[in-house]
Image: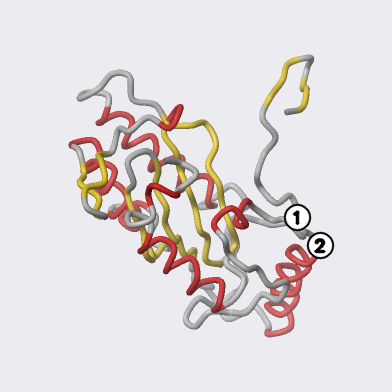
């Protein structure tokens, strides 16, 4: 916690040297307020969605409809949180960008990661991180021709949360999200595989989950 204008606020989990509109794969975790079980329950190692959980599932799948440059990887709706892999993949619109410029931007991405040893709370998921970022085919790191606030990760998550909230509150007026979300920039293939396996196994390991 830090003070801003004499008021306490929660410090951001974002990596300051990273542009979250850059093409990359992001592992995000979004929690409900006070970890309330709005989305359903785990039965015999499988997630059974509530009506609100079905809404969250529907809106998550619809993200690419609202953000065409987004592709979704593995995801899971849990009783009080959502884990998902989000790929930002924006296409360069013209041929004026040289290979050298693209390389320069890719280098900035590498430097942004190398200058930070604790990018996000990925370590709480038991993921072994590497300092070397590797392009995941076809998850290539190319230059974005978009402004930093245009189609960044925050705007994607904000749109998703807003849509779910509006519909969920017709069922339960007390539905709320935790204000922040957690993100992890996927660094390499091993990182990607570990996260994918973690998401798939999440329901079976629910009793050991720190969000239980």
Q: Secondary structure at mark 1?
A: loop
Mark toward the viewer: 1 or 2? 2
Image position of 55 with respect to 138: above or below: above
User: In the image shown, does 14 or 38 lie closer to the viewer?
Assistant: 38
Left or right of 4, for residue 98: left
- Residue 65 is situated, as x and y percent measured from the top left of the image, at 30, 55
Image position of 35 with respect to 15: above or below: above
Q: Residue at x 43, y 63 (%)?
A: 69
Question: Cβ–Cβ below 8 Å for labels 1 and 2?
Answer: yes
Q: Residue at x 45, y 43 (%)?
A: 30
User: In the image shown, does 36 or 179 lie closer to the viewer?
Assistant: 36
Image position of 173 with respect to 48: above or below: above
Give me the disc on residue 115: 2
Q: Residues within 10 Å of mark 1 (few under 14, many from 20)?
A: some
Q: How many marks?
A: 2
Q: Residue at x 62, y 57 (%)?
A: 123
Residue, disc 1: 17
Q: Residue at x 20, y 46 (%)?
A: 48
- Residue 140 is situated, as x and y percent measured from the top left of the image, at 55, 78
User: In the image shown, does 139 or 119 lie closer to the viewer?
Assistant: 119
- Residue 116 is situated, as x and y percent measured from the top left of the image, at 78, 59
């Amino acid at each position: 916690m830090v003070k801003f204008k004499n008021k306490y606020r929660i410090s951001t989990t974002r990596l300051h040297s990273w542009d979250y509109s850059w093409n990359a794969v992001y592992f995000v975790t979004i929690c409900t307020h006070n970890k309330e079980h709005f989305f359903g329950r785990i039965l015999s190692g499988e997630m059974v969605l509530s009506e609100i959980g079905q809404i969250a599932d529907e809106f998550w799948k619809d993200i690419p409809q609202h953000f065409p440059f987004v592709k979704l990887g593995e995801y899971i709706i849990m009783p009080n949180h959502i884990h998902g892999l989000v790929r930002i993949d924006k296409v360069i619109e013209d041929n004026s960008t040289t290979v050298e410029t693209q390389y320069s931007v890719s280098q900035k991405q590498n430097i942004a990661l190398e200058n930070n040893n604790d990018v996000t709370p990925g370590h709480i998921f038991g993921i072994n991180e590497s300092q070397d970022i590797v392009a995941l085919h076809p998850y290539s790191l190319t230059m974005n021709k978009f402004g930093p606030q245009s189609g960044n990760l925050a705007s994607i998550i904000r749109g998703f949360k807003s849509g779910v909230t509006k519909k969920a509150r017709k069922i339960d007026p007390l539905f709320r999200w935790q204000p922040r979300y957690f993100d992890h920039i996927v660094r390499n293939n091993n990182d990607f595989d570990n996260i994918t396996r973690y998401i798939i196994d999440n329901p079976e390991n629910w009793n050991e989950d720190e969000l239980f």
